[in-house]
Amino acid sequence: MTEGPKRRLRLLITLLVAYVFFTVVQLVKVQIVEHEFYLRWALDQQVRSIRMDQPPRGVIRDRDGHLLAGNDLRYAVDAAPASVQDREGAAGDLAAVLHKPASHLLDQLSSRDEHGNYRQWIRIEQPVSQEVRDRVVDLGISGVTVKPLWKRTYPEDDMASHALGFATPMTGFYGVEGFYNEILQPEPVVWKGPLDPGSAPIPWQPITGEFPRRGVDLELTLDRTVQGLVEAELARALETYQAEAGTIIVMEPETFGILGMASLPSYDPEDYARLADMNPALFEDPAVSQQYEPGSVFKIVTVAAALDARIVTPETTYQDEGWIEVGGHPIRNSRDHRGIQSVTDILVKSLNVGAAWLSSTMGPDIFYRYVQDFGFSEPTNVDLAGEVAGQVPLPEDVERWSPSNLGTNAFGQGLAVTPLQMVTAVATVANDGNRLRPHIVNRRFASDGAESVFHPVLEERVIAPETARTLTEILVQVVEEGATNAQVEGYRVAGKTGTAQVPIPGGYDAEKTIASFVGFGPVPDPALVILVRLDHPQTSEWGSQTAAPTFQRLATQLFTVLGIPPRGDAVLAEAGS
């Protein structure tokens, strides 16, 4: 063979060997080195994760089963732009049904991702009604689908809005909706399996695993009838006494369950989206999120501490000069009461000097120990979102506390509490000195039928039962001789008024007050504890003239509606029984 053909043969063999070597290298790279990558790529083309349609959020009912928060079925219109064939025609057809500009819909159906490809999924509109859903389906547009969507509804409109809170399609906020959001939310389930070329599950592929489960249903301690009366009486009080705002809480002292709780102004939970832009402060519940100086109702705590510590008895007397100096700060009575006064008089006549004398006699260690045991320096741990703690200056906090605080704190000035903390403290007296954890959810019902019931939680044994009963009789005398506007015909009730100044930078507002009354009855077996707080009433600054008669009207109605006998020898009848 001549030299020329030999060279060509060698070149051909060399190229063939090189080709075979390159092919082997590529096969090794694809099948061994990059095996995992191509396996994942193949599975990504064949298998997808699909979030199954979500069941509804758990519902919320009152103690008698009345629906307070439920769900309505709505729909969402979705599209896969990559699968829409006639985009202009589809946009025009959808515009007539959804009442949206065709140009806007065309932009949506033509949207692309960052790589310039048509998007795989977009949401066209939500929520839409059953009628709109049917019309969209009848259009038969390729790439356009309709899926069920749940909308949170509140059948009683703004009733108990602060207690309930509200829920968006995804999350609950404030109140019960916010606190129990995790269990109210349905459990999402993602199905993973093979898809056909149109991204639909292969029909003969069995679906394995769990199906979605709806959220947990809640039964509240709230009583719809009690709540309605509370809200009506609060609205009446604001109008009658020209108050800017107010709060009423009704609690069952045996369990610390909240039977009714309202604050005004309130809001419609279904209107949260508009209000979020206008006045989101409306969402905060003043009963648990707003602090205020309680004023003279706090004297209940001061007298309870002195009696339980055996510093004094109800008959112990002192000389009241009309003023006293504590820590270099002068303290005066709100009215001109002088002379020999008793511990009972401190509450009946609401004597600031007497309260300051008691706290000074006890000293800071004993006084603030009881203040803390009554729960004023910490949240109550109620099952409502947004609760804050009170602000109590303690001797160990040298930057906030001074010796004068020992005198002013004794009659509810210079410290801040929430309405729920205050009613909880008084409920502690009504419950023989035992402070329980307040709560608003009574039972939970899981989707599998499991039921759990709330059991009272003892937080602290604050005062002895005999101290509580002695103090209760003094508070009955307060209503019979002092706060007579709180008397309920045929019933023995206990309580105390409060008229608190409103702190401003540099001192206190000369014109505004917070009027309050906290009471319970019937005595000696209390069935209800009621707190009334009115912000800045104009007709009278005094709690005895505004909050006390509000308590009287509401207690009269509740005793009748709940079937509570005039004598205190029966417990609260079960509502609806």
Image: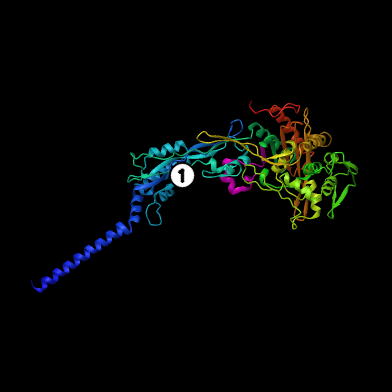
Residues 375 and 411: in front is 375
Res 77 → quadrant: top left
Report helix, strand or loop for mark 1: strand
| Coloring scheme used | rainbow
Left or right of 89 on screen, residue 215: right
Left or right of 336 on screen, residue 169: left
Q: Which residue is mark 1?
A: 125
Q: Is residue 46 above or below residue 494?
A: below
Look at the image and give the residue range highlighted in magenta: 260-285
Is 262 a magenta residue? yes
- Name the image quarter holding the N terminus: bottom left
Outermost residue to the right? 339
Res 530 → quadrant: top right
Residue 240 position, x and y percent, is 74, 37
Left or right of 126 on screen, residue 550: right
Q: Report if residue 511 is visible in the image.
A: no
Residue 223 position, x and y percent, is 64, 33
- Please state which amino acid type lies under the numbered disc 1: Glu
